[in-house]
């Protein structure tokens, strides 16, 4: 799929790549998906995520996302935790079996 921008792209978001393609290429992409893949597409966070919402590709212990309201920090963290438990794609197995979520107060546990 060719994009409408010139030069190489560091964009990793599938949605951003598809959005930058021509209308014909976008239609071709959607037609190329099977019914199951098309139905799964809205739920694949790695496809829709902005570049800053994806976990670093290197080995890391601390991942800091600095951003204002609406930057997608909570969504990115939630998607990462979910991918550790469920895997990143349908039918993938996750690497984590138990997750501990810690809130500032006990009231956060009921949210």
Image (cartoon, rainbow, N blue to C red):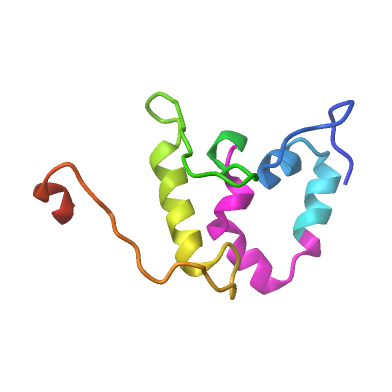
- The range drawn in magenta is 31-50
Residue 107 vs residue 1, the one in the foreground? 107
Which residue: 74% across, 44% down? Answer: 18
Residue 21 vs residue 52, the one in the foreground? 52
Q: In the figure, residue 38 lies in which quadrant?
A: bottom right
Q: Is residue 99 above or below residue 68?
A: below
Q: Position of residue 35 (x, y in %)?
A: 68, 72
Q: Is residue 44 above or below residue 59?
A: below
Which residue: 67% across, 44% down? Answer: 15
Residue 104 vs residue 59, the one in the foreground? 59
Q: Position of residue 91 (x, y in %)?
A: 59, 76
Q: Is residue 18 above or below residue 88?
A: above
Q: Position of residue 53 (x, y in %)?
A: 53, 39
* In the image: residue 88, left or right of residue 14: left
Which residue: 16% across, 48% down? Answer: 108
* In the image: residue 63, left or right of residue 111: right
Total marks in image: 0
Q: In the figure, residue 11 lies in which quadrant?
A: top right
Q: In the figure, residue 97 lies in which quadrant?
A: bottom left
Majority SS type along the magenta span: helix
Which residue: 52% across, 69% down? Answer: 94
In reply to whether residue 45 is colored magenta, the answer given is yes
Q: Position of residue 3 (x, y in %)?
A: 85, 36
In reply to whether residue 36 is colored magenta, the answer given is yes
* In the image: residue 92, left or right of residue 61: right
């Amino acid at each position: 799929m060719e994009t409408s921008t010139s030069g190489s792209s560091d964009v990793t978001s599938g949605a951003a790549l598809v959005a930058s393609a021509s209308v014909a290429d976008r239609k071709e992409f959607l037609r190329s998906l099977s019914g199951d893949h098309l139905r799964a597409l809205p739920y694949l966070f790695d496809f829709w995520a902005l570049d800053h919402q994806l976990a670093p590709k290197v080995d890391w212990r601390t991942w800091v996302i600095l951003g204002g309201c609406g930057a997608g920090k909570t969504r990115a963290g939630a998607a990462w935790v979910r991918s550790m438990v469920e895997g990143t794609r349908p039918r993938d197995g996750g690497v984590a079996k138990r997750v501990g979520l810690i809130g500032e107060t006990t009231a956060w546990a009921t949210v």
